[in-house]
Amino acid sequence: MIKKITDLIRKGILQNIVIGIYFLTLLTECYFLYTRNYFERIYSRPTLMPILFLIFLQQFISRNHLYIVGAMIAACLGDYLTISYSALYQWTGLGCYGLSFIFLAIQFYKLEYFSFKTGKLALFIPVVGLILYIVMMQYFAESHNLALTKWPLTFLYATAMTFLGISILNIFFNNKNFNFRFALIALGFLILANLLFDVSLYYVHRKQAWIDCVSAFSYGTYQFIMVRGLLRAKDKIMGAEYFQQI
């Protein structure tokens, strides 16, 4: 039995099956959002990251992956806390998401150290994006008489995402050993997911369920691309033999 499982892992069949389960669970999450069965999300949203962890479990055998594992744990806590009806849990979950961004950013910096000489554009683009986001949210709040509660926490979350964006652009511009286009694509899905969430929450007041579905699917896709791509990058750049190439 163990030999059969080992053969499946080597052939990648078992991993592909779990990947299918991951996206099936993600579609289930979208279905619950669309039908507004928010209570049922306890069976979908918090299980996404553990399933993603199972996909790459055979590779997590070294301290070489601690930042990736830390980011996944923080994101998993964020998934669990943000589906709660408690405001305290929701804001704590938002902080967990921010922590996961910081872990991922550190991992990118470990692969390619930041240099102001070659990283000015990598610094400029995300910072400008953060400023535009803050200005947009403040303008929207005033023009629609909207009270943004705990807005400093929201902007801290956006700052953590900016930190991740800087690290991704830095390594994309500087590293010649590996194509980090996957990270840009993942970052694009993350930004899309958050912008759609803000539109749903502050503009349409959760009345358009399809926006929540697209936001959730975009975030789930970001998680998958980011973790899968980072593991490949570490294998290529650092020459690690700790895990199989997928």
Image: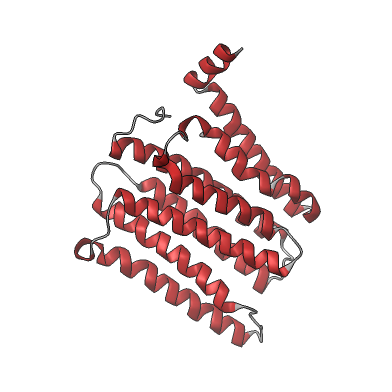
Left or right of 214 in this view: 246: left
Residue most extreme to the left = 117
Q: Quadrant of the N terminus?
A: top right
**Residue at left offset 55%, top offset 83%:** 138
Q: Quadrant of the C terminus?
A: top left
Give the x, y percent position of residue 100.
Answer: 51, 56
Give the x, y percent position of residue 202.
Answer: 65, 73
Give the x, y percent position of residue 65.
Answer: 43, 42
**Residue at left offset 39%, top offset 29%:** 245
Q: As displayed, is residue 232 above or below residue 175?
A: above
How many marks the image carries: the answer is 0
For the question of whether residue 36 can be seen, the reply is no
Task: Say which of 25 and 3 sits in front.
Answer: 3
- Name the quadrant containing residue 150: bottom right
Task: Say which of 112 and 193 sits in front.
Answer: 112
Q: As displayed, is residue 16 above or below residue 210?
A: above
For the question of whether residue 160 can be seen, the reply is yes
Task: Say which of 49 and 25 sits in front.
Answer: 49
**Residue at left offset 33%, top offset 33%:** 240
Give the x, y percent position of residue 122.
Answer: 31, 63
Residue most extreme to the front = 63
Q: How is the image coloured?
A: secondary structure
- Name the quadrant containing residue 84: bottom right
